[in-house]
């Protein structure tokens, strides 16, 4: 009897998980994944390449020395974890964009970063601004992606993988699998 109850609970749980996965908006989650990569790339590029951090064990070896190594701060797991903690706060700088030629929808950054040229604004005619709370869906998707893929994100960035969008959003997560022909940089 107890085995039957456990089997039914597992089946109900599996149905719930698969149905929640199916309801994910592909455009929203693909855009969130791309935005995370874009924001992290930008943040990593802003760190002084000369800055390093000590990593490794801080235990004394039998001969009295400490075995540690220095790695660049920008791609250290510690720094990347800190960046991931705040990456979803920038989702308010994104809005739904429809390409006028291909009619493909994706969330794109519309707000320039403080260090970017002030004259390099996108064409706002192709963005859909649905009020001050419109970015909440993208922020929630961003937080879900970060929670689900945090280890993979840190691993890809710390290893310096070249095409992180492709690797993370298409191969690892499948968020952008169907839209791989629109896999442009945000």
Image (cartoon, helix red, strand yellow):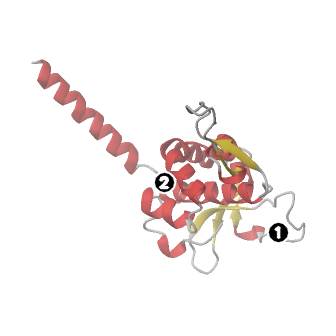
| Picture quadrant of residue 173 | bottom left
Front residue of this view, candidates 121 and 66: 66
- Residue extending furthest top? 2
Q: Which mark is residue 180?
A: none
Residue 184 lies, with reference to residue 41, above or below; the image says: below
Q: Is residue 91 left or right of residue 122?
A: left
Q: Position of residue 62 (x, y in %)?
A: 55, 31
Note whether residue 148 is visible.
yes
Residue drawn at x 47%, y 58% as measured from the top left: 175
Quadrant in the picture for the N terminus: top left
Q: N-terminal of the two: label 1 or label 2?
A: 2
Instruction: Measuring from the top left, give residue 143's x and y in whole percent.
Output: 58, 42
Residue 95 x, y percent position in the rendering: 68, 57
181 relative position to 12: left or right: right
> Quadrant of the rendered structure where residue 37 is?
bottom right
Mark 1 crowd level (few <14, some 14–19, many ≥20, 10 Å Cα) = few
The residue singled out by tag 2 in the image is 25
Say what secondary structure mark 2 lies in.
loop
Residue 144 vs residue 165, the one in the foreground: 165
Q: Residue visible at 60% across and 30% down?
A: 60
Position of residue 126 relative to residue 51, above or below, is below
Asked which secondary structure carries label 1, the reply is loop
Would you say the residues marked 1 and 2 are in contact, meaning their CB atoms lie under 8 Å apart? Answer: no
Mark 1, residue position: 121
Q: Quadrant of the C terminus?
A: bottom right
Where residue 19 appears, x then y in whole percent?
34, 44
């Amino acid at each position: 009897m107890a085995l039957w109850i456990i089997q039914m609970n597992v089946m109900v749980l599996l149905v719930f998980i698969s149905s929640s996965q199916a309801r994910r908006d592909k455009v929203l989650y693909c855009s969130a994944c791309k935005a995370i990569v874009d924001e992290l790339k930008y943040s990593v590029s802003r760190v002084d390449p000369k800055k390093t951090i000590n990593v490794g064990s801080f235990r004394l070896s039998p001969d009295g020395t400490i075995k540690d190594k220095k790695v660049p701060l920008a791609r250290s797991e510690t720094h990347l974890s800190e960046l991931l903690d705040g990456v979803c706060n920038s989702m308010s700088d994104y809005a739904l964009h429809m390409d006028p030629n291909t009619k493909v929808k994706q969330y794109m950054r519309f707000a320039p970063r403080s260090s970017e040229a002030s004259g390099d604004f996108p064409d706002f005619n192709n963005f859909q601004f649905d009020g001050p709370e419109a970015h909440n869906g993208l922020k929630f998707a961003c937080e879900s992606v970060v929670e689900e893929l945090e280890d993979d994100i840190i691993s890809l960035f710390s290893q310096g993988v070249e095409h992180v969008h492709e690797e993370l959003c298409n191969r690892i997560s499948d968020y952008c699998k169907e839209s791989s022909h629109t896999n442009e940089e945000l």
